[in-house]
Image (cartoon, grey):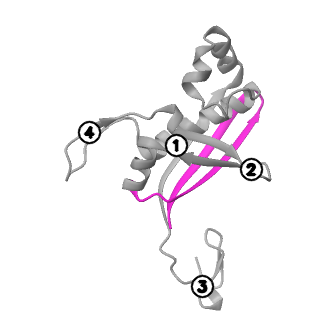
Amino acid sequence: MSDMEVDSMSGCDNAAGGCKQTGNSIIGIGVDAVDIGRFERALAKAPELSERLFVESERGLPAESLAARFAAKEAVAKALGAAGTEPGPEEQARPWSLSWHDVIVHNKKNGAPALELIGEAATRAAASGINRWHISLTHDGGMALAFVIGEQI
């Protein structure tokens, strides 16, 4: 990138003297896709699944919204590295798993989604240095998608 360009990732105008480093870092990224029809059939076949996957405030939403929230929970798990055992060079390998109730998707007053992590998910995020989450949800064409970024500010 030449010094005359605006850095599209940070919005910095390098020709005007660049930007100050903020120290923000992306720690984890997760994305997941859920087939809404398949998810809806699974919920109809096993009604207790809704209680296993969602906290009370999330239940009762339309299938496409539940599918997007489930995709968000999966995306958070990926951002946190929840795929079983994580062997760290300084620490003993420790299995851990995400409780679906530890990741809650709320809606802000303006309708935008927001994440709340509690329990082991919150502990894992804090240990990773994540103290801010960004989330985007969508559903169209029979698919629900979630994209999350865990950031350290």
Q: Amino acid at mark 2?
A: Ala
Residue drawn at 52 percent across, 43 percent down: 76
Q: Amino acid at mark 4?
A: Arg
Residue tagged by mark 2? 112
Describe the element under mark 3 as helix, strand or loop.
loop
Q: State the CA–CA distance, disc 3 to disc 2.
A: 36 Å
Magenta residues, start to end: 128-153
Main secondary structure of the magenta stretch: strand
Residue tagged by mark 4? 94
Q: Amino acid at mark 3?
A: Asp
Q: Amino acid at mark 1?
A: Val
Determine the image quadrant of residue 140: top right
Residue drawn at 63 percent across, 42 percent down: 105
Q: Horizontal placement of 103 versus 113: left or right?
A: left
Residue tagged by mark 1? 76
Q: Check whether the beta carbons of the residues at disc 4 and disc 3 lie within 8 A of each other.
A: no
Give how far across and how far down residue 22 sits, in percent.
Answer: 52, 77
Q: Check whether the beta carbons of the residues at disc 3 and disc 2 lie within 8 A of each other.
A: no
Q: State the CA–CA distance, disc 4 to disc 2.
A: 35 Å
From the viewer's perspective, is the residue at label 4 or at label 3 nearer? Answer: 4
Q: State the CA–CA distance, disc 4 to disc 3.
A: 46 Å
Residue drawn at 41 percent across, 38 percent down: 82
64 or 7: nearer the viewer = 64
Mark number, residue 3 = 3
From the viewer's perspective, is the residue at label 3 or at label 2 nearer? Answer: 2
